[in-house]
Amino acid sequence: MNKIAKIYCTFVFALSASGAVAQDVGEYAFSLGASSVGFTGEVKYRLSEKWRLRAMLSGAPTYRKREESGDLIYDAAAEIRGLSLLADYQIGNSQFHIIGGAFLSGTKIVGQTSGTLLIGDSVYNSTIQADVRFSNRVSPILAIGFEQPIGDQWNLAASAGYMYTGGVDVGISVLSGDPVDLDDLVNEAHQIQSEVDSGYPFLTFGLTYTF
């Protein structure tokens, strides 16, 4: 019985050791990938055996689509970009880690609509523009990540979590046509804000090279 127990303990230890990833304090890594906040380029620094610091630039080409809000349809152009400052904490000897940090946003959406518009309770023949940004210029992030070695210096890395943006701030201006009552403009801004959640998924996937 003792012999069987020893074999079992040796087997469990071997499995645990195989799941651990060697980490050298002071090492640097570079990653390229994609995320819910655009394409990414990232620098990582191993601060200790458990802790790692990360800085991730993200962005995407401007994309255009039609967005409906209440009774209006906007021709919108979105620019997604920002800087994520993050810290990882390794969970035990596993390849999972907890991620905390913040997203410094440069993201904005600009939408225009024109013609005969129902704004608030009134009808106007105007062209208006809506400027939309995250309410939090610095948005907290909490996520969990996983890395899978695929070579001596290469890892596949992925993470999933949540970024609290606080919703959006909306500014609406009249570009041409009938002047629009200020209260109607405020109501239209509130309409757009009510359709946007207070947070945003934080998802990343990339290939990492360790120096």
Image (cartoon, rainbow, N blue to C red):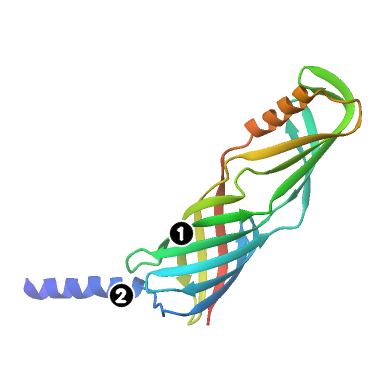
Residue neighbourhood size for the residue with mark 1, other residues' Cα within 10 Å, grouped as few (<14), some (14–19), many (≥20): many
Q: Is residue 112 above or below residue 178?
A: below
Residue 133 lies, in percent from the top left, at: 68, 44
Percent of width and height locating residue 23: 40, 77
Pick the front one: 22 or 196: 196
Q: Residue at x 46, y 67 (%)?
A: 147
Res. 132 visible in picture: yes
Q: CA distance from mark 2 to mark 1?
A: 23 Å
Above or below, comparing residue 34 to residue 20 in the picture:
above
Q: How many marks?
A: 2
The residue at which mark 2 appears reads as 17
Amino acid residing under circle 1: Ile
* Side of 69 where 143 appears, left or right: left
Q: Identify which residue is drawn at 56% across, 39% down.
A: 198
Q: Is residue 35 above or below residue 164?
A: below
Residue 113, by quadrant, is top right
2 or 1: mark nearer the eye: 1
For the view shown, which residue lies furthest in the left direction? 1
At mark 1, the secondary structure is strand
Q: Residue furthest front?
A: 182
Q: Is residue 36 visible?
A: no
The secondary structure type at the circle numbered 2 is helix
**In the rendered view of the protein, which quadrant contains the N terminus?**
bottom left
For disc 1, the marked residue is 99
Q: Residue drawn 58% across and 38% down?
A: 197
Q: Nearer the viewer, residue 32 or 171?
A: 171
* Earlier residue among tags 2 and 1: 2
